[in-house]
Amino acid sequence: MPSNHAAVQLPLWYHQPFKAIYISTRLLSLIALLPFWTVLYTVTSRPRSSWSLRESVMVRLLRQLITLVADTGISPLSTDKTHEVPQHELKESSFIWISPADSDAVRGPAVDELVKPVRIPGYVWPKGRTLDEDNSGGFVMLFIHGGGYMMGSGHESFPELHIVREMYRLCNIESILSLDYRLTHEACHPGQLLDALAAYSHLINVANIEPSRIIVVGACAGGHLALMLLRYLHDEKSLPLPRALMIFSPMVDMTIDEELRNDVTKERPNSAIDALITSYIANSRFLGHHPKTLLASPLLSANLAPPGSYRGYPKTFISVGGCEIFERECANLAEMMLSDGVSVTLDVQQDAVHDFWGFGVIVPSNLARLKLSEAVREWVKDL
């Protein structure tokens, strides 16, 4: 799965031997930083008074590790998407291949001379069940993982799949398809859109699931991809829209990181305390050979869509942490949807950081996760 980054100017430390030196130096620095943060948050105030010492240190550690991924282009916790995972290696899910969507469903912004549809992996939850096995009327979930388009996978071993486990436990969901889409080292845009479209088409055209039973769920970059998929379905009308959209800590605006590169005064709220630090490099790799102006399109920046763009959208649930850099953008998106007549719920959990449901107990806070779990259960129950 070759990528095309010919138009992207990558830093020196993206290339060996500078990459190895840079990574080693950053990791070695943690030997000093971890005890320093521990002492710092023991004797001084923490970023939030409700955070424990462990949570405060873990947030700082995650900031370092996420920055390292963006700065060097490494792709931890990702998978080989040409390899079929043996079923005996999976405990909670079953591996399937997802074929590209039919050619008549691929149109407009999904058509690209350099990036083509490919067969991709998917994982069906719970293990042993096929997607078309039970048509009793329960919901089927399409889950799209996060990781900034740089890391992660739809495999059950990826920590963010905690969201899948919780939603299956809490809600009337019969089965789940977890998508393992191409990351930026495997394909630039529209590769990710093509993969999401393939998974959605698989549910409808292969598993014969009615769109009215499908909930599209995305976290972080997966939330961005879920928004991209819905924008594509809405505008191109290649397939019917799903029953509902649920996005957790979604990336909403791809233009801000480029703006911050030139004007630091445009800093996002909570930038100093959130676990996430974003990077224009990651967005540039995602964009690939396309012009930067595409970043401001409604397809890639959902909250830059013109008025009326969300008319006809399905019921939507947006979750964001109160200490998250995406809080303002998610609030703007919810307002836009509401103005266009969408039934939208914005759930903001105070003192919670980016992807707090996906990261689990390592980040603040357990109370936020409990409240979100209850909100999700009630929201899906009312669909």
Image: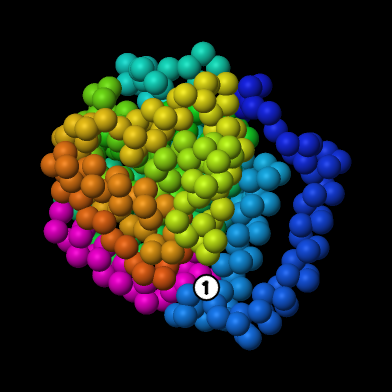
Q: Nearer the viewer, residue 231 or 383?
A: 231
Rendered residue at 29%/45% (across/down): 333
Considering only vertical position in the picture, is 215 above or below 52?
A: above
Horizontal side of 21 relative to 53 (left or right) equals right
> Where's the C terminus, which quadrant?
bottom left
Horizontal side of 121 relative to 129 (left or right) equals right
Q: Describe the colour scheme in one phrase.
A: rainbow
Instruction: Please provide percent x and percent y for residue 168.
Output: 32, 61
* Residue 221 visible somewhere in the drawing: yes
Q: Nearer the viewer, residue 91 or 49?
A: 49
Residue type, label 1: Pro
Rendered residue at 24%/42% (across/down): 336
Instruction: Please provide percent x and percent y for residue 99.
Output: 43, 29
Horizontal side of 254 relative to 345 (left or right) equals right
In magenta, the rendered stretch is 359-383
* Main secondary structure of the magenta stretch: helix
Crowd class of label 1 (few under 14; some 14 to 19; many from 20; radius 10 Å)? some
| Quarter holding residue 289 | top right
Horizontal side of 360 relative to 80 (left or right) equals left
Considering only vertical position in the picture, is 18 above or below 231?
A: below
**Residue under circle 1?**
47
Q: Secondary structure at mark 1?
A: loop
* Residue 243 visible somewhere in the drawing: no
Considering only vertical position in the picture, is 40 above or below 102?
A: below
Instruction: Please provide percent x and percent y for residue 182.
Output: 53, 36
Taking the magenta stretch, the answer to whether it contains residue 374 is yes
Residue that lies at the very extreme toward the bottom in this rendered image: 43
Taking the magenta stretch, the answer to whether it contains residue 264 is no
